[in-house]
Amino acid sequence: MFDKILVANRGEIACRVIQACREMGIASVAIYSEADRGALHTRLADEAICVGAAPNPSSYLNAANILSAAVITGAEAIHPGYGNLSEDANFAEAAEACKLTFIGPSADAIARVGNKSMARKIMRENGVPVVPGSQDGIQNADEARQIAGELGYPVMVKASGGGGGRGIRIIHNDEQMREAVSQAANEARNAFGNGELYIEKYLEDLRHVEVQILADTHGNCVHLGERECSIQHRHQKLLEESPCPAVNPALRRRMGEAAVRAAQAAGYTNAGTVEFLLDRRGRFFFIEMNARIQVEHPVTEMLTGIDLVREQIRVASGEKLQHEQGGIWFNGHAIECRILAADGDRGFIPSPGEITRWEFPSGPGIRVDTGVTVGSVVPTHYDPMIAKVICWDQTRELCIERMRATLRGARIEGIKTTIPYHLRLLGNAYFRRGEITTQFIQRRLPIPTGGGL
């Protein structure tokens, strides 16, 4: 097992990994930008080291500085969290070259599943159903129009190397194609350094359901059930839950087996997520695989009792999985609300500033993962998510009521948050009945206009 791990991230996920290290008796090193000097994650870690100026490219995306920090502090491994460099194959390869263990899949596996058009090809060849679309990346708008004509509109152009909702456009006719392809390619190039796109048939009235997997380096791979992730605004998730209200045990088994098959086909190890679209008839289609821990991993932990971050560290150190598929149980229901520093009443306009009050209720079945506290300053440079509130109870109905009570009891001052919107969402009759698709927000609970996120 490792003696010291550098946590190559910030905010709540950095705090989460640091806590796991502490529980395992492993020393932790935090990195920070100049804007995050004194941030909560720097205070929780055993050591902290500055890696650059406030903008992400100068600090949390500065691979050379981060690797230097790991070497200087004597870290043996790097945990990348999610976002930033977590799915950068070059960073994983560079870490290994510096004799540092990358806590995640191999650089080759990241490259295989990170290029989404390549991942689709691997899945097709291994019997995992995929959304109809292009066989490879598209070269230009003319090729895109030809493929769209074969698929039938509407279609989606998507970034081959992307994630987080960037580089995606929905297209309804030939006239929209050229501008949409240009915009999506530019956005993908700016966000990921890769402007390649591919095309999928745009399927409506579907659920976005993902399956958590764990795989070790000894050939063992298990799934930990599914998460319902359809509540999204501009392809950004706002609320996740497990289990999915539309998945029965037989479908869970089929989706789980497909996810394990997908991971094995990609030569994948460590924690990962296989994402599917699910229709009303119980048919599911692979859309992508995320080669990292997910923001929403706590709902799976609450349901199964398995600490995913601890398992990541154990697997990376060469240990075998502690769990067999038949021994994984799913108990009750869990919901996660992503709390953003944004005005939930005015179109999610960002709300940076100093937090002058920060209080959440506590009790059975309540967990708050955060990277801020009283006195923390929410900067303008980074993702506005400041906390995740996770609630568990025996049934979905009880879990919804526990989450509503928890959010109503929260007291946050100095900034605006999305809690008012989450409360409206949790009280929505369609949501409470589990009638959810990826179009839920725009159809059932539109976010007020205001030029926000």
Image (cartoon, grey):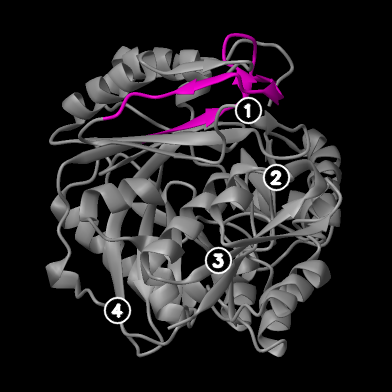
Counting residues from the N terminus, which is met first, the one under dot 2 or under dot 4? Answer: 2
Residue 178 lies, in percent from the top left, at 85, 42
| Residue 430 visible here | no
Label number found at residue 321: 4
Residue that label 3 marks: 28
Residue 156 lies, in percent from the top left, at 64, 44
- Helix, strand or loop status at disc 4: loop
What whole-number distance in Å separates the C-alpha atoms at marks 2 and 4?
34 Å
Label number found at residue 375: 1
Tags 3 and 4 touching, CB below 8 Å: no
Counting residues from the N terminus, which is met first, the one under dot 3 or under dot 4? Answer: 3
Q: Quadrant of residue 24?
A: bottom left
Q: Does residue 171 show up magenta in the picture?
A: no
Q: In terms of depth relative to the viewer, which is nearer, 78 or 241?
A: 78
Read off the magenta span: 336-362
Q: In the image, which is nearer the foreground, mark 2 or mark 3?
A: 3
| Residue 267 visible here | yes
Q: Amino acid at mark 1?
A: Gly
Q: Amino acid at mark 2?
A: Arg
What whole-number distance in Å separates the C-alpha atoms at marks 3 and 1?
23 Å
Counting residues from the N terminus, which is met first, the one under dot 1 or under dot 4? Answer: 4
Q: In the image, which is nearer the foreground, mark 1 or mark 4?
A: 1
Q: Quadrant of the C terminus?
A: top right
Which residue is at a point 60% across and 45% down the rendered structure image?
11
- Helix, strand or loop status at disc 3: strand
Label number found at residue 166: 2
Which residue is at a point 34% across and 88% down the rendered structure image?
219
- How packed mark 2 is, by other alpha carbons closer than 10 Å (few <14, some 14-19, many 20 or more), is many
- Helix, strand or loop status at disc 2: loop
- How packed mark 3 is, by other alpha carbons closer than 10 Å (few <14, some 14-19, many 20 or more), is many
